[in-house]
Image (spheres, grey):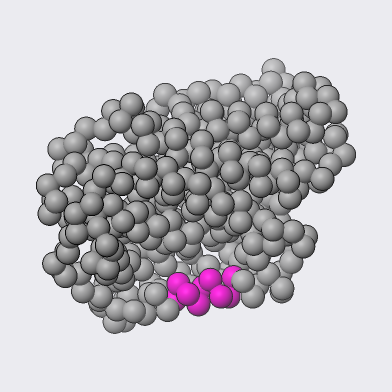
């Protein structure tokens, strides 16, 4: 059996198992990668080269800073102030969702949900209301805004690494408004959906101040990281190494500060990090690298290009909404990783700016996960927290918020990207 058939078989098998065994996705990705190397479908050298180490540095470094930032309790402290300043409960919930969105633009989505959840649950208990809708709204808000910046979410990091986009490129790319503005317009549209859902809560509520900031140093480290990433855009325009080094350096500084000031165990701190997603990402890079090297990406691009013909708008629409539908049920990281090279090849065949398809793909894949409770890791975490509180989230419960929220956000961002990048 030739290497191209083996690579396709292992790739498809791995993705099918991702769907049916989501809790084992890291084991599956790593095992599939080792199988590719063992069968000599891909050499160890090619497998190592397929991993985008700059993206891995960004992910691990940001994860460390985010974890220590969360432990500082600054976000939860700010959330309490927001609740007390809001004119009624409905606006308190909306402001908490907005805070979730803001934090998740710079902190991984799961960490954001864990940061904000205690405030939401405290508010629900005080008002004696079901926290389900509030927690779902927090999860989908964090998923949406995580797409806005390079460091907000793994899919954005993947796109940045693949297209060699730096931190500043997510705001303005080639002198045009970029992903950030598409996401923010989508956020405005979806905010109206949340307002409609929570408008009935008109009571004025004050929370007892229970949160105390342990230290502002992690906030300073996070802000400094963001500034340095923005500055690195001018020094490493090819997005080849500097962002990853900066994030890892920030992570090391955060760990050392935690060790010296709080006497925390470095080993325990490192163990708490999301190593599963780290190894999962590495496995995905190798899986996608194998089908790229064996020619399957080009074949898929030829098929899709033939399907859309010369109709660029149809091709763009197909990529966006196919991504939305599939990402509602499968993990957006492996899907996006597989489709990024396809989008580039399609763009080349249609002789258009690849940014149109790449940005559309990111929007569709990242926001489509908001439709169902299994579409994104933050959704799974939010539902898990609710279950601990005695509230079982069914698919229809989640989709009552997820579907209109996603449609509003995707439609707005989709139109913005077309009008800015479709010509």
Residue 316 at x, y = what percent? 71, 35
Quadrant where the C terminus is found in the figure? top right
Residue at horizontal 33 percent and vertical 26 percent from the top: 396
Q: In the orientation shown, which residue stands out farthest toward the bottom?
A: 261
Above or below 265: residue 333: above
Is 228 one of the magenta-colored residues?
yes
Residue at horizontal 67 percent and vertical 29 percent from the top: 318
Please indicate, yes or no, whether residue 376 appears anywhere in the rendered image.
yes
Instruction: Write the start and end of the magenta stretch as one range.
Output: 221-229
Q: Main secondary structure of the magenta part?
A: helix
Left or right, 298 with respect to 189, comes to: right
Above or below 157: residue 285: above
| Rendered image quadrant of residue 287 | top right
Residue at horizontal 73 percent and vertical 46 percent from the top: 419
Residue at horizontal 84 percent and vertical 42 percent from the top: 352
Above or below 29: residue 207: below
Residue 417 at x, y = what percent? 68, 46
| Rendered image quadrant of residue 116 | bottom left
Left or right, 41 with respect to 421, comes to: left
């Amino acid at each position: 059996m030739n290497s191209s058939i083996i690579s396709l078989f292992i790739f498809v098998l791995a993705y099918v198992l991702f769907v049916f065994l989501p809790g084992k996705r890291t084991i599956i990705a790593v095992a599939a990668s080792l199988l590719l190397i063992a069968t000599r479908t891909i050499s160890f050298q090619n497998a190592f080269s397929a991993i985008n180490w700059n993206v891995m540095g960004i992910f691990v470094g940001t994860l460390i800073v985010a974890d220590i930032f969360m432990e500082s309790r600054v976000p939860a402290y700010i959330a309490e102030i927001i609740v007390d300043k809001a004119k009624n409960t409905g606006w308190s919930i909306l402001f908490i969702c907005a805070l979730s969105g803001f934090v998740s633009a710079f902190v991984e989505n799961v960490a954001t949900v864990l940061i904000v959840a205690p405030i939401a649950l405290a508010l629900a208990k005080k008002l004696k209301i079901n926290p389900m809708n509030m927690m779902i709204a927090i999860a989908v808000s964090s998923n949406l805004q995580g797409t806005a910046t390079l460091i907000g979410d793994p899919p954005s990091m993947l796109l940045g690494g693949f297209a060699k986009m730096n931190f500043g490129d997510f705001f303005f790319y080639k002198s045009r408004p970029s992903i950030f503005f598409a996401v923010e317009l989508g956020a405005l549209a979806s905010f109206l959906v949340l307002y409609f859902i929570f408008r009935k809560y008109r009571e004025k509520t004050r929370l007892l101040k229970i949160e105390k900031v342990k230290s502002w140093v992690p906030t300073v480290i996070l802000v400094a990281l963001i500034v340095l990433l923005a500055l690195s855009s001018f020094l490493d325009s090819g997005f080849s190494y500097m962002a990853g080094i900066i994030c890892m350096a920030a992570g090391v500084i955060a760990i050392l500060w935690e060790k010296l000031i709080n006497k925390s165990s470095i080993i325990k701190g490192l163990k708490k990090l999301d190593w599963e997603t780290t190894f999962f990402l590495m496995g995905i890079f190798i899986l996608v690298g194998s089908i790229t090297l064996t020619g399957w990406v080009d074949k898929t691009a030829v098929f899709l290009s033939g399907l859309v013909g010369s109709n660029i708008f149809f091709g763009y629409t197909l990529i966006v909404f196919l991504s939305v539908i599939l990402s509602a049920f499968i993990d957006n990281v492996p899907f996006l990783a597989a489709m990024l090279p396809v989008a580039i090849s399609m763009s080349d065949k249609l002789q258009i700016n690849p940014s149109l398809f790449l940005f559309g793909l990111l929007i569709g894949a990242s926001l489509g996960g908001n439709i169902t409770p299994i579409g994104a890791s933050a959704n799974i975490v939010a539902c898990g927290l609710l279950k601990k509180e005695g509230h079982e989230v069914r698919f229809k419960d989640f989709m009552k918020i997820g579907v209109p929220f996603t449609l509003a956000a995707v439609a707005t961002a989709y139109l913005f990207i077309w009008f800015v990048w479709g010509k």
